Image (spheres, rainbow, N blue to C red):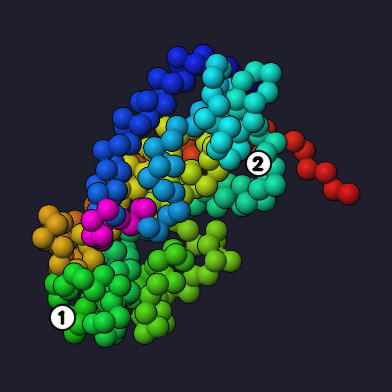
Amino acid sequence: MTEVLAEDVWRARAEMQRARVTPLIQPRLARRAEGTKHPVEDFLFEYYSNTPGKLQTWHPGAGVALGGHAEEYLALKGYVRNSEGVTAPIESLTPRRESLANTVDLLERTQSRTPEFSCFGRHEWAMVYQLDPDEIRHSAWPLRLTMDEISDVITSSPLKCTHFDAFRFYTNAAKPLNVLQPTRATQADLEQPGCLHAGMDLYKWGFMFSPWVPSELVVDCFMLAREIREVDMRVAPYDLSALGVEPIRIETAEGRAEFAGLQRSFSDRQQAMRVRVTKTLRHLLAAMPPAYVS
């Protein structure tokens, strides 16, 4: 059954979305106009495909129709007008059934696992391991340790990355040092809820199925991902003190303990967020018309 929102109601919610998101995107838009970069804050806009404008656009989610004059939504992908109003019918998502089902499976399997907290956030270290200075991804920012010191941290204990989309950026020299060799095909077998990148990816799984996922949930995921990203780069070997990003010195026992504590806290929070995302996507999957096999 479709819920129909009166125009004054949905316009108020859309305005609340814009007011909430505007402070989150304004610095990115200003930097883009100036041609400057921020290695922490730009990541969510550059690595993930959701643009600031799309993040700011409010969507009610599946099973909701916008009453009154909502012609601006007809210009957005997924929306049609029917007798109840302007809506994004679940039938339009049917061609993506397999992708949706695979995402739900990944999230549920990740949720079921015991979190692991022994990686110590060394993925950014493994991404610069034994590289020449001009090959380093964030080469505009200095390293706070020498390459020899970075090598000592990398080789001090086995690398334990479980997340393919972090592991795939390891240097060729670092990849053999990882206990596991994650691939895209084994992602659902290895993803675990202690991983910071798995927590950031909840944002991706939310906006990937927009406009059928309510925008409030997508923004909640984005805000959690922003916090995680800051810790992700605080633990990196870069000197970002000029940006006010103070390092977590995992080359020390105290730094490793600090990071593990933050990782545990994020794991609890991302598990709660994962439940919300999974429930929403599972509902979409269940609401789809039955698949027919010819």
Q: Is residue 39 left or right of residue 115?
A: left
* Residue occupying the point 53% across, 70% down: 183
**Magenta region: which residues?**
33-45
Residue highlighted by disc 2: 93
Residue highlighted by disc 1: 146
Residue 139: which quarter of the image? bottom left
Res. 64 visible in picture: no
Badge nearest the viewer, 2 or 1: 2
* Residue occupying the point 61% across, 47% down: 100
Q: Say which label, 2 or 1, has the lower sequence index.
A: 2
The image shows residue 193, relative to residue 142, as above or below, that is above
Q: Is residue 168 left or right of residue 100?
A: left
* Residue occupying the point 28% across, 77% down: 136
* Coordinates of residue 21 in the picture (x, y in percent): 33, 36
The image shows residue 126, relative to residue 270, as above or below, that is below
| Predominant SS of the magenta segment | loop
Q: Depth check: give the residue in front, 289 or 83.
A: 83
* Coordinates of residue 34 in the picture (x, y in percent): 23, 56
Label 1's element?
loop
Name the quarter where the N terminus is drawn: top right
Q: Depth check: give the residue in front, 85 or 194.
A: 85
* Coordinates of residue 230 in the picture (x, y in percent): 25, 53
